[in-house]
Amino acid sequence: MNVTETTVRSAHTTTDQSPALDVLDTSRKAVQKSKALMLAQGGTLSYGALFDRISRLGTLFARLQLEEGDRIVIVSDEDIALASIFLAALRHGITTVLINPKSRAAELRAQIAAADPKAIFLDQGVVQRSGPKKSPLPIIEIGPDCGKAPSRWFKRQGRLGEAAPRFPDLLAKLPPSDQLPQTLSEHTAAYILFTSGTTSKPKGVEITHRSLFAQMRTFLKHYGFDDSMRLMNLLPFHHTDGLTQGLVVTLCAGGSLIRPMRMRVNSVAAMLDAVYKHRVTHLVTVPSVLALSMSTEPRYQDSLQGRDFGYVISTAAYLDEQLWRNFETYFGVQVVNVYGLTETVCESLYCGPDPATRKIGTVGKPVDSEAKIVDEHGTELPGGSRGELVLRGDHIMRGYFRMPEATADVVRDGWFHTGDLAILDDEGFIRIVGRKKEVIITAGINVYPEDVNAVLRAIPGVLDAACFGMDADIWGEKVVACVVPAPGAELTPESVTRCFLERTSNEKLPREIHFFDELPRGPAGKVIVEETKRLVQARRDAAATSVTRDGDLRARVMTVAASVFKCRPETLHEGSRQDDTQEWNSLAHVELLLAAEVEFGVRISPAEIMRIATLGDLLKVLRSKRA
């Protein structure tokens, strides 16, 4: 056990002082300055550099007149910058609101307004694409470390001078602070993450220092993390699984976080290579990545069998039991399956790594918390009964930010109602069997149908809309939308997609859009989801039997790709790739390959998948199969 871990475990026992002070100050003294806290795509952040930045950011916070409990917003894809600002804010008792940097302008504005911050930190590209044009708040642009261009800084009362540079270059102009806070309440909010945001009232989960460090104590104890830990977690920092089960726990353990790349479909092999190269001890990822890893070439089979590697932690989505068993057999390592929500900081239930909590096919047992299964009245059910899973513990959120009614709906008598349906077996293990909430989990990301429906119904020409999740192979579920056009409206999937993306982020975009004259509804007027799904499946089946297999190969590939990416075929070409095609993300990449297999009646091998980065690459693979 290292000094930092001891501090995290004991800091909460005698006072309402936040453990953040002791954890960060102990790390500053005990961990070698040259040690890497994080190896990221843009470089390396050492412990020494982190604490220098924390001190200088203290000066910046003071000039911005930020005090304990004030909020700042960070909208950034720059890992090192985000980590520096977040941890500095944590040390100073400032609440960080983390927002997806790929949010559309309307969504970004709604979430910033809901956060009511005192200052905003934005990536340079976000400012140019959808940042505020006028603001009474200071907005600090974030750029790469080599950036020297003057910032487009919206000054407030001239606090920072006339031509402040971008972060992190501005740190060189700030002296280290000699007035770090000596007291900090554990009841202060550490951060806020939005679980939805396309409606007029985004729902922000407010996590206190008390809850955050309760989760850290559980992580360190249950996983056995210490300063030898080299954790790979490529999940984004604006999601709790990347932030808390990546950055924060690494700092608390005094270890190193390995993030040398972005997680994409064709980077899975590179990820496995990096596990070996960087002597990774633990890999935190989502089930879809486990499934993709099974598609790599046989030479990657021993990637997780190095002497340093311990186990994989699967989080954020349902882990299929057969995939679980196949992965463990193929790679020869244990998979720890965990369950939690943004509202519980991160995890509440653990299946492994210890034998006492491990039973494949379940989410294990609660650790440092309580769990029970209840009926619709909140009455605890006996073992073997199907009911709602409710949780209680120090790691539960304070509530939804400035939304007392929404908080009261889910936190009752100290128990958090998850909305997930579960069964407790006779050995005390919990199995998730369904969802009470209408939430779609696609590639580990929660998408709320009411958010998607609200955006769809706001599109000109849309009379009504309903969306839901449908099974989608590797990614668990895909968002499917059914739209009723208004009389006389001429809507296409492309036009709906274009309007949708003007209002919200790509991750919520329906991957299929079907038009109907009306939607099936029950006596109370509510859309009958199962009946609507049957109508969609009937259309899918009909389309599959009418696929034509003649015509120009290139034209057909562009047509298939345009259908997946929701664009016009003429906008695509053989050089089109993920970086320059708006809707070509990891989810769409998988859909493209699956659609190509159906259209051309072929099987694309794992090795071929890893080589496909452009539409031209896909054409080459298909031509080779015709030869």
Image (cartoon, rainbow, N blue to C red):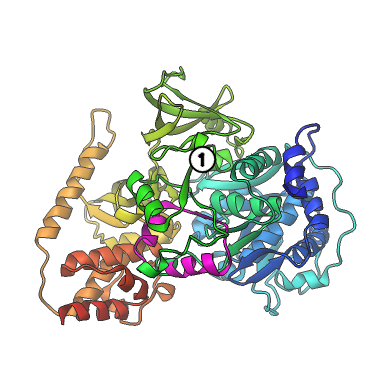
Name which quarter of the figure residue 621 lies in. bottom left
* Left or right of 426, for residue 357: right
Is 589 in front, or is 39?
Answer: 39
Q: Quadrant of residue 28?
A: bottom right
Residue 248, compared with residue 616, is above or below; it is above
Percent position (x, y) of residue 105? 51, 60
Q: Is residue 273 magenta?
A: yes
Left or right? Give the position of 412 relative to 456: right
Residue matched to label 1: 340
> Residue 476's x, y, as percent?
34, 50
Residue 495 as seen in the image, left or right of residue 251: left
- Which residue appears at 18% of the width and 79% of the height? 553
Q: Residue 72: image x %, image y %? A: 68, 53
Q: Secondary structure at mark 1?
A: loop
Up-down relation of residue 29 to residue 617 (above or below): above
Question: Is residue 519 at least partly visible in the picture?
Answer: no
Residue at x 14% of width, y 58% of height:
543
Q: Quadrant of the C terminus?
A: bottom left
Q: Amino acid at mark 1?
A: Gly
Q: Nearer the viewer, residue 285 or 587?
A: 285
Q: Position of residue 257 (x, y in %)?
A: 62, 60
Magenta-colored span: 269-296
Question: From what the image shows, is residue 30 above or below residue 39?
Answer: above
Q: Give the residue displayed 10% in from the left and 75% down from the top.
A: 550
Q: Is residue 464 left or right of residue 141?
A: left
Placement of 138 over or under 212, stated as above or below: below
232 and 89: which one is in front? 232
